[in-house]
Image (cartoon, grey):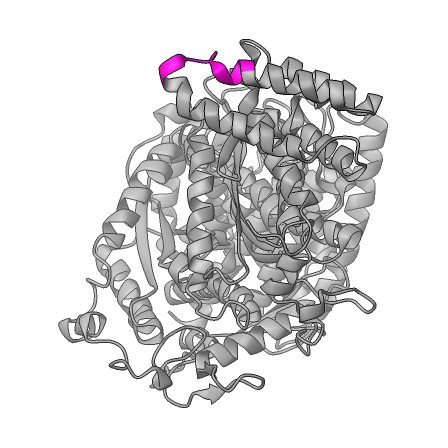
Amino acid sequence: MTEEEKERIYKTALAGLLHDIGKFGQRAGEVGTDGKKDHPAVGNKFVNQHVPTKWRGALAPVGWHHGDPEHKGRLDGLGFPVKVVALADRLSAGEREPQEKGGWPKQMVSVFNRIAINGTLDNDLAYLPLKQLSLSQGSIFPKSQPDSTEDINAMYRQLWASFCAEADLLARAHESEDSSIKAYLESMLHLLRRYTWAIPSAFYYARPDVSLYSHLHTTAALSACFAKQFSKDDPVDDLLNRIRGKKTAAWPQSPQVATLLAGDISGIQSFIYSLHQTAKATSVLRARSFYIQMLGESVARYVLRRLGLPMTNALYIGGGGFILVVPPISSGTIDDLSRRINRILLRAHGGDLYLALGDAPLAPYHFGMGAISKAWSDILPQSLQSRKDHRFSELTADEIRMVFAPQGAGGDETKLCSICGQEANGLVEDEKDPNIRWCGACRSFRSLGDNLRRARYLTLTQIGERPLSEESPSWEDTLRAFGMDVSVSDQPIHKKNSVIFSLTGSDDPAPGPTTATGIRFLVNTIPIFKSGEQLPEQYRDDVRADGVKHFGILAHQSMGASYLGILRMDMDNLGKIFSHGLREYDSLSRRATLSLLTSVFFEGWVGKIADELGESSGTRLYAVYSGGDDLFFVGAWDATLELAMRIRSDFSRFSSSEKLGISGGLVLVHEKTPLYIAAKQAEGAESAAKHLRPEKNAICFLNTTVPWEKFSFSRKEDTVVYWANELRNLIDAERLPRALLHVIQDLHAQYVDGQGKRGGVGPWVWRAAYWFHRAIEREKHETGRERLRTIAALLSGESFAKNIGWLALAARWAELATRKEGNSV
């Protein structure tokens, strides 16, 4: 592909990205240069005032994508780009049918309210704030009522003024002759995400739950596809004629006009968690997780570059995977891409990591109401699974033999890296322990982990694809093989052909003529020793030079018993939500909006919660990963439990629905437990939570699974949290005997052993009645006697079976929290 062809595609994508920018200005009270109030006229004015002069001529579609009645849509040589964007716009906006009249405000309704769980919809709607995207409660959490019309108009004016000011800064950076349309297009994409993420795409005839950003993004992606796929008017005219004036259900099921192309890395868990020296590998663990994120991003950009497409065509990148919108693509091209990608991964990771590429064809029909589900939720996963079932089959026979060739050092441990367990040359002894040896790859991960601790900026630089080194390639070497140089730093690094992301949401880097900029959320919680902080005696000389606490310190900073908490959580039924939850309202833009909101919570707000907990009770949490719809944290056990409860509470408010669940598994392990074992145990606990009941929405803690509403979100005296805190406080104040905790747990064990034969009422009920009667008589404090009477009532008669499980969990929790240091399990 020539540079001229590539620039034409990028310009068309930019026209698609800005085609409805006039809606933003129109709602802020802006009018066109000629006084017209329609959004194409306002958009045309924006182009002529806030876009670099050199690219304005290519943006006629912004002002004319709905046609001109006086000239029947003829635009003096610009008719083809206009038709391309008009087609992309119509397909992208397929979700606006059926019409839902009702006088909607100009404020976006949360797309979570559209999801039907078990066939029912929430009647109450939630309205997103008209604010820039930032990690504050007032900016991202919805409200039960829309703002007043006066306030809405004022917020639009304020947003529009700020957006135009930033667009001007971007335009000035790109007025030079050497400025790059690629950098400008990506900068504008990120700028629009920040400003239009919670602005509705339309509100006149449909519930406003699709963001303007998602509509602009998908329109830009399709515009780029059509610009590359078509070179003349005829096929575009034909498609426009075949969908014009028709219901989306009647849109044609041929020809194929685009492809969903998905990439998914397998082997991630084993790669991240299989570390042999957990205490020494704290920074390596975080770095490996970050590397997987960057690997997915680098491969996505590699594929787009190979196909000659801009970043607008990446609908989603995260968690070691991506979904792209590309023109119709042959199986041979997919095989070639897969071969190139996995050849690099095989050499870098010896078969541990594999990237599957799956595809699903899209016809006009798929952009109508409810039709995208078949392609996205059925065909695409099947295609991916087929690739995963035949890992590396696209490689040559000689290359595949590498996967099955004998591995290892023949029992010579001196040739094995102590951190990852892999054989490598050039091992280096640890600075403090000569019995620990580091390979080059693990040293590079340790350096990355150290840099992540101070990271404020992420820089991705496109470079020439470099061959991998023969021996123990570093993470940088692997990404450079895909043509991407990645760095994290505390100051912005301006390089040619780069994109710089602010990781703090503030102090945005200044754009340059060949440098794109944006903000990016990254959960980067790392436990750092603070000056004056008290540490357990055995670890006072064991803090790393960079101040990062290892897992042993975190375990001993737990409340009571010295254990690590291993927490895994993810959103319930996400696959079902995407495949069935949106029902007839399913569409490409609505899915993009749902994905956007989910990523804001898991990639952004979860980190905010963890940081806030660190400020209130000390930094005792370590983020291994949070993104997509799941998370993994390690930390002091009581801190991870507090984190889990806060995440569940905030997710309910963020999604504005108690029906949308997030389940979790939390296990307590010794500090020296290998992480891969602990991760597997937490995975099992999470699975138990998800299998408790059809609606899931539960937590498994201390091998006991409880619905969230019973754990911490219903009437306070009927929850695990309430009684765990109550028991702990009363025992600490010597108002209740510690023996009570063991009695409750023993009664539960007796019930579990015998209820299969005797049912819910058995000798445990009488034993409970007897014990509590005697305890009340012996208790000297009225507060203690009152609490004992309450527990006795909960465990009397038929109530015993209903309450003993969660009361035993509360007792076990209180026992751990009140245990004195030095006690063992």
Residue 768 lies, with reference to residue 525, above or below; the image says above
Residue 301 lies, with reference to residue 419, above or below; the image says above
Asked if the magenta segment contains residue 762, the reply would be yes
Q: Is residue 496 left or right of residue 755?
A: right
Residue 350 is drawn in which quadrant?
bottom left
Q: Nearer the viewer, residue 162 or 347?
A: 347
Residue 664 lies, with reference to residue 778, above or below; the image says below
Q: Is residue 662 left or right of residue 155?
A: left
Percent x, y for residue 67? Answer: 55, 38
Q: Is any part of residue 715 visible from this angle? A: no
Residue at horizontal 57%, vertical 19%?
A: 803
Which residue ends up furthest to the bottom in the rendered image? 426
Percent x, y for residue 168? Answer: 76, 60
Percent x, y for residue 54? Answer: 63, 66
Residue at horizontal 35%, vertical 24%?
A: 250
Which residue ends up furthest to the left in the rendered image? 397
In which quadrant of the rendered image does the N terminus lie?
bottom left
Q: Is residue 116 left or right of residue 410?
A: right
Which residue ends up furthest to the top in the rendered image? 797
Q: Nearer the viewer, residue 68 or 585?
A: 585
Q: Nearer the viewer, residue 355 or 156?
A: 355
- The part of the chain drawn in magenta is 757-766
Percent x, y for residue 39? Answer: 67, 38
Q: Nearer the viewer, residue 555 or 107?
A: 555
Considering the whole magenta stretch, tell me its main secondary structure. helix
Q: Is any part of residue 214 visible from this angle? A: yes
Q: How many marks?
A: 0
Residue 432 lies, with reference to residue 348, above or below; the image says below
Asked if the magenta segment contains residue 465, the reply would be no
Residue at horizontal 17%, vertical 73%?
A: 401
